[in-house]
Structures are given as structure tokens and as C-alpha cells.
Image: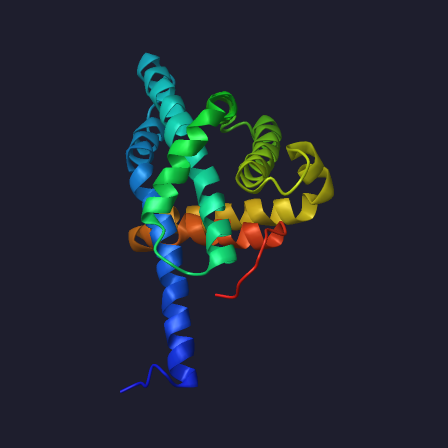
Amino acid sequence: MINLKSKNGQKLMASGNWLWSLFTINFSFFILNFSLILTAIVLFNLKLSVMFYMMLFILWLMFSVFTMPGLTASFATVQEWQVNGSVSFFKYFFKKWFDFQKNYRINFGLGLVASIFIVLNKITFGNTQWHTVVLTFTFVYFMVLVATNFQLATHKFNNILTLLVSKPLPIIVSVIVFLILILMNFVLQLAFLSAVCSVSLATYISYRLLGGQIAKKD
């Protein structure tokens, strides 16, 4: 048996707390956005039609109410974790998600832009030149999305533009990390990892890359 009071035991407990923190943040986000994930799967299998735009409208509402404030809450929860140590964050996450509904203009605005990019990607798919242009602007949108959520959660910089100008490379890396973890889980159909650490791990890495406050070691 492992002596939890020993050095190795303490390391094991610290690792367990770290993983539990990661899990509680991600699982909270996953539960909150489960209906959006199902809606997105249906939407991406539809052709451009009235039904497509109806589903897109529903997706826009879900993204604005669940995903945007949920992602901001993820960053805020990671900050709480990094400042005060590893604990269970289910309650804290949902409290922050509710609090960040106050940013409804930003939430619905970025949700609308996301909807536009979904349509543009659908229309230009198959046309290499135009689709590349749309994908490039989509990536820039993701940069703004990450920067916005980090800034809303931490208020580390004067404004979002300052963050984008100050840390373009870390933001690019953050977006790549988000895309790799999320797309890898869906492409490889790693449903377990999607629920456990896809978003929270990406948020954690992004938080560190963007210089989030760290006041206590895990």
C-alpha cells in the first residue's frame, strides 16, 4: 500500500486533485453544452435549406447562452483553481456561467459571427480558394473568441484588443490546442476524453500561455 503521508504519496494525491479539478471543469462544460453538440452534429449533416437555417438559429441561441458564457466560466474557474488550489468546481463553474450571462451582447454577437462562418464554410466547401479564405478568417475568429473569454474571465489586460496585440503567438497556440483536443476527440470518437478533459485542458493550457494569475502550486 502507498503511504499517502510519504513524498510519493503526496505527489499522488496532488496528481489526483489536479485531475479531479480538470475533470469537474470539463464535465460541467460538457453537460452544459451536450444539447448544442447534438444540434451541431445534426446541422453539419444537413444541406442548405430552410431546415438548415432553422437549426442554425437554434444553434446560435445555444452557443450564445451555453457555450460563450460557459467558456468564460471555464477560464474563470481555472483562475480560481490556480489561485486557490485544486478542489471540486461543479458549483463554482455553474455560478460563474450564470454570472457571465450579463455579457449577453458579446455572447450573442460572437454567436452570430460564428453562425455566419458556419454558413460561409458550408457554401465555399469544395471551392479550395474561397474555402481557404473563409477558414483563415474562421481561425482569426477563434483567436478573438479565446482572447475575449480570457479577458472577460480574468481582466488581466486593459481590454481585449490589448490582449490580442500583446500576445498574438500565445493566442494562436491556444487556438491550435483547442482545435487539436476537440477535433481529435470527435474524429477519433473519444467520447470519454471529450467529457473528461478536452475543453478544460485546452483552457488550462491557454490560461498558462496567456499569463493568467498563479498564486498557489497545485
Residue at the image position 73 percent from the left and 38 percent from the top: 165
The color scheme shown is rainbow
Residue at the image position 56 percent from the left and 59 percent from the top: 215
Residue 184 seen in render: no
Residue 150 seen in render: yes
Q: Is residue 181 left or right of residue 207?
A: left
Residue 126: % across, % down:
50, 29
Residue at the image position 37 percent from the left and 18 percent from the top: 57
Residue 81: % across, % down:
46, 55
Relative depth, front residue between 132 and 204: 204
Q: Is residue 2 left or right of residue 77?
A: left
The N terminus, quarter of image:
bottom left
Residue 41: % across, % down:
32, 34
Residue 39: % across, % down:
30, 30
Taking 17 as reference, is 77 above or below it?
above
Taking 66 as reference, is 112 above or below it?
above
Relative depth, front residue between 213 and 165: 213
Residue at the image position 53 percent from the left and 63 percent from the top: 216
Taking 120 as reference, is 90 above or below it?
below
Q: Is residue 102 left or right of residue 26?
A: right
Relative depth, front residue between 6 and 56: 6
Q: Count how many numbered circles sit on residues in the image.
A: 0
**Residue sticking out furthest to the top:** 50
